[in-house]
Amino acid sequence: MFELLGDYTVQIVVFSSAVTGATSGALGCFAYLRRQSLVGDVISHSSLLGIVGFFWLWFAFTGNGNKSLWLLIPGAMTASIVAMILTQWITKTTKIKADASLGVMLAIFFGSGLTLLRWIQRSSNPIPGQAGLENYLFGMAAATTLPDLWMIGILSVVSLTCLVICWSRLKLLTFDPGYAAGLGLSIKLWELLLISLLVIGIVIGLQIAGVVLMVALLIAPASAARQWTNSLGKMIFLAALIGAVCAASGAFLSAVKKGMPTGPVIVVFLVLGVLVSVLFAPGRGVLSRRRSLVT
Amino acid sequence: METAIKTHGLTVSYGVHLALWNVSTQIPAGQISGIIGPNGAGKSTLLKAILGMVPTLSGEIEVTGATEQEGKQDQCLASEIGYVPQRNCVDWDFPITVLDLVLMGTYGRLKWFQRPGEKERADARAALIEVQMQEFADRQIGQLSGGQQQRVFLARAFVQQPSIYLLDEPFSGVDATTEKIIMDILYGLRDKGKTVSLVHHDLTTVNSYFDHIILLNKQLVASGPTQSTYTSENIQATYGVNDMQIGDVSKDVIDV
């Protein structure tokens, strides 16, 4: 099985999964600490409408099917940003609470995405290249190509550079936005940056983990890493490492075993990571806290 | 009397809920003033409005305190004010150390891409010494008691080196010893000519703590020097006439 690691396609699949896992893991720490897991879930689910929508639009204009991430990621971003804007608008102008409007947005965007997907796949005149579009539900790392890897790589480098350069401000904004406002920081602008980083952290993983399970790749590494350290820098580093290892091994397994969707396999690895951390981490782990209660 | 902050006709609402109505008052410079009123009277909102953290419907806010200090002219007004928010407004399980938290006070003078350096670290350690928290510098913030958390928040305001300090309920959930330590620090600030203003709800200590009080219940009820303003009529007007218990307490306080 491991001789396959020498295979060029498998290398691309494993490498791009590792990059995705690292980036999503690192950026996910902010979502985790800002308690935005639900926001992350809405972003990833609603991106399905963008993926299918852009695929269909491309076909409508060119007559061809195109499943390159260079087309689908901008589509995913567009849909999730529209979903976020609408959520904010609903919360502001109606009496519907934030979590309810998030739930409604998820249902609307994911539902229409699924409908459009089925409609495209069942139409009597099938669009060339539509086969495999349903893989964006649960991820199919094996379909990753070199141009896809470039797209993932560029977005990762841009977002992680942003993270490093704006480190202090992002830390302050995440910890105490009220105080940041008191210092005269433009909260709206920085919120926008944080949400954009979150969107990037999600859309790069849609090929690999799929829209349904992507939020796990965002939140699980952060939850695991948080148990081992009390330093934000170390936590982000560790989350990136956990994300990379889990995503790469999950992608490798699913690429080797035909027909196994990547997302669920990655999630199984992530769950193991979280479980071990929550149980065994020194200081915060369940076992060590129990021991310190006894002694 | 010199004023540090002046508000004129300040009105703030959260949606349809009115928080402050037409408040015109002033915070005197170089004194300790208390902002006093029942829950939901808009005390915290007044601080937040001054800091520009909540949008105002109408009215003006003028911050005039000590803007002439050397090297400070080019900074925005917000950095003139050291804000100490309510303790429960942050997640104390956040993965940072006490020193990291205090360092955040220096972010106002750093550019957006800069990180705190040696000088900022030295400032932060000095601020921790002032609140007697230096030996906790490398602890995770969740391992502190309520009073220690409050002192760390105060140290964060110190490193900003502001001329005005605004504190939101600094004594809530804090033991008597810490309250005294914090109060001594605030007296020290006043002696250095700084302006200190705090939201406060313990009526028994008003007379001993404050030079000046602002009585607030969505509208301004009264404001002025504590001696002449802290009368039982004003307190009843602030807290509602039917509240006998508070009326009784205030009478005791005034008699002392």
Image (cartoon, grey):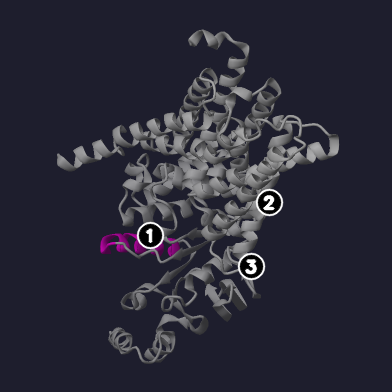
Image label count: 3
Q: Rounded to the nearest whole Å, what is the CA distance between mark 2 and mark 3?
A: 16 Å
Residue type indicated by callout 2: Val
Q: Is label 2 or label 1 in front?
A: 2
Q: Would residue A176 appear left or right of B114 to someone viewing this image? A: left
Residues behind callouts 3 and 1 on a single chain = no
- Residue range in magenta is B175-191
Closest to the observer: A29 or A206? A206
Above or below for B97 versus A282: below
Q: Is residue B189 magenta?
A: yes
How crowded is the residue under tag 3: few (<14 C-alpha within 10 Å), some, or many (20+)? few
Q: Residue A93 carries which label?
A: 3
Q: What element carries label 1?
A: helix
Mark 3 vs mark 1, foreground winner is 3
**Mark 1 nearby-residue class (10 Å; few <14, some 14–19, many ≥20):** some
* Letter of the chain that mark 3 sits on in the rendering: A
